[in-house]
Amino acid sequence: MDTLIIKDINNKTMQTAGEIIRGGGVVAFPTETVYGLGASAYDDAAVKKIYEAKGRPSDNPLIVHVADVCDVETVAREIPWNAKKILESFAPGPFTIILKKKDGISDTVTAGLDTVGIRIPSHPVAREFIRACGVPIAAPSANLSGKPSPTRAEHVIHDMLGRIDAIICGGDASVGVESTIIDLTADVPTILRPGGITLEDLKKVCTNVEVDRHVLEAVAAAEQPKCPGMKYKHYAPDADVTVVEGELSACEKKIKELVKREKEGGKTVGVLAAADADFGADLFISSGKDNREFARVLFDALRSFDKNGIQTVLVQLSSNDEYSLAVKNRLYKSAGNKIIFV
Ligand code: TXA
Ligand code: MG
């Protein structure tokens, strides 16, 4: 299949993308979190093409994207008061709300569930694209299933060229990890996946917010080393990832030790850490000054290690802030729970 690469964002090219969607095609588009792989949420056959292009298991539901708050009611059966409050405070932005779904949204989108994830991205190109489509857009992240989510157009081209109809190139994602998923189908709003809208943000508008235990399950699994981490492996580069977590100097010491050991074993070694403490790695990538920056560079860094033939990646996790939960959640999964606490 020929994939149309759209680099010029203007009314005409967005109309072209909209026509492709209305004709049952699949188009990748930029958002502030990660790139998405979109099709009409009303078109079962088109949505099936998304699962095929990604190699995604069909029991994993997709998020439905709309351009404006007023469009939420075209997807959700009812909008509870806490959803209204969250939308008022944060939309458009890097979060997804789970609500009861309306008829007409394809069962293929929701994997047969009675609920649906709804997201209003803030990225101007995403909103222009969705408006040009004129239908709600079902879209997962635009990576091959299991691989790190794409935060730059080149990542999407790498994974999806020849597999989908078009790719809209819209620069680098500013958040860098996928949206915060908030389940609003029960009384207490629950974070199912941490992201750009943090627990602290949500606590400012909801009296009670919970974090689903699966977000932290990686920790529990890490505490029982016998538990095979493989079943949690996502966001996984080809390289073998290990997270080293704890106080800065202890982490640096441990990572230096591990770099030496791995290199003696003949491996090429990459390090992702706040600052290069003479680790002696073949490739060092800075994770930035805080976890917000870490989130922004994380997936690109994992892909860069692969591109450079790195076999072992060591990641330092030393700082704690509002964004820690989002960064940790992704890192634990990409490491398949190989976590060393120092
Ligand atoms: O930032 C994002 O959310 C990006 C951009 C493209 O918007 N999308 C994204 O989609 O990350 P995806 O498919 O990679 O991740 C969606 C997650 C999956 O883990 C899926 O299981 C969950 O959302 N999900 C979707 N619908 C759900 C539902 N009704 N109930 C519970 N979880 C749901
Ligand atoms: Mg994904």
Image (cartoon, rainbow, N blue to C red):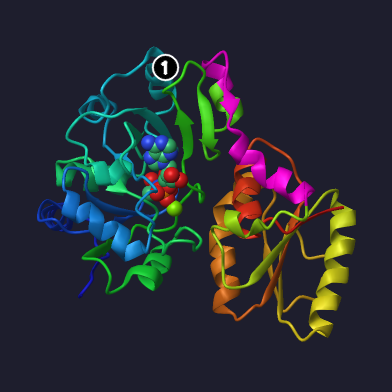
Q: In the displayed structure, does residue 14 sit left or right of residue 289?
A: left
Could you tell me which secondary element the residue under label 1 belongs to? Answer: helix
Q: Residue at x 71, y 54 (%)?
A: 227
Q: Which residues are magenta?
A: 203-224
Which residue position is annotated with label 1?
Answer: 85
Quadrant of the image occupied by residue 220: top right
Quadrant of the image occupied by residue 201: top right
Magenta segment includes 215: yes
How many marks do you count on the picture?
1
Q: Residue at x 10, y 54 (%)?
A: 19
Task: Provide residue 235's location: percent of width, then percent of height.
Answer: 54, 59
The verdict on label 1 being within 8 Å of ligand 1 is: no
Magenta segment includes 281: no
What's the magenta bit mostly, secondary-structure-wise?
helix
Up/down of 165 relative to 307, above or below: above
Up/down of 86 relative to 126, above or below: above
